[in-house]
Amino acid sequence: MPATVWWRFGARFNVCAEQYVPAIRMHENQSEAIMLRWGLIPSWVEGRPQGPPRTVVSAARLDSTKSCRGAWISGKRCIVPMAGFYAWQLTTEKYRQPFFVHLKARAVFGAAGIWDRWLSEDDDVIESLTLITVPANELVSEVAGPAHGMPSILRRRDYATWLHGYPAAARAALQTYPAKWMRVHPVSPLVNSAEVDDPALIRAVG
């Protein structure tokens, strides 16, 4: 449990870029639970951010991706709680069938992310995050293809290491979660619409 809780949110079933999501990070040597915008805006950006926000970054590119390097080096790491995520399979009919991926034994899990704080010339502040991805396991690869990544799901024992451990130990926590501990099932294509946010989106279909 975070030492300080600032977040207020309800269950969401279809989260899109630039929406606010719950996250846990360190502040003044204590953990805090806050809301961060999904889609990283680096602190060094001048003027209004242009282009689509960065929602994910590969663990292998944390050091080399310009928009994420500063946050990673500064140790701005966070944990994003979630119940699952979506993956899409391109069928032989060229239709993108969505699937819901979740864990067998954990109703909610923590995914690794990094965050940053952007300040505009007008003193507007946006604190935002990007999720870190790792190579997909066999289960996710079977759905989305071998080139598709997946969120870096943290083991409970690695939460503290990820939030405030040394960089080398934190990077070692970024592992592909075992397929044997996960489940996947097809869901309604309504999830493809950002305007739909309903518990029915994660129910199995077909």
Image: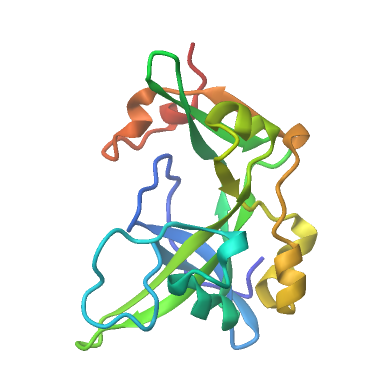
Nearer to us in this view, 64 or 80: 64
As displayed, is residue 198 above or below residue 130?
A: above
Left or right of residue 175, residue 101 in this image: left
Across and down, in percent, residue 161 comes to 75, 71
Q: Place residue 132 in its image quadrant.
A: bottom right
The residue lying at 63 percent from left, 53 percent from top is 152
Q: Residue furthest top?
A: 206
Nearer to us in this view, 35 or 95: 95
Nearer to us in this view, 100 or 95: 95
Across and down, in percent, residue 46 comes to 26, 83
The residue lying at 61 percent from left, 60 percent from top is 59
Q: Which residue lies furthest to the right in this view?
A: 157
Across and down, in percent, residue 33 comes to 54, 69
Left or right of residue 145, residue 162 in this image: right
Placement of the N terminus among the 4 image quadrants? bottom right
Left or right of residue 200, residue 32 in this image: right
Which of the colour schemes (rainbow, by chain, secondary structure, one colour) is used?
rainbow
The residue lying at 75 percent from left, 40 percent from top is 178
Q: How many marks?
A: 0
Nearer to us in this view, 105 or 64: 64
Q: Place residue 118 in its image quadrant.
A: bottom left
The residue lying at 70 percent from left, 42 percent from top is 106
As displayed, is residue 188 above or below residue 109?
A: above
Across and down, in percent, residue 87 comes to 50, 34
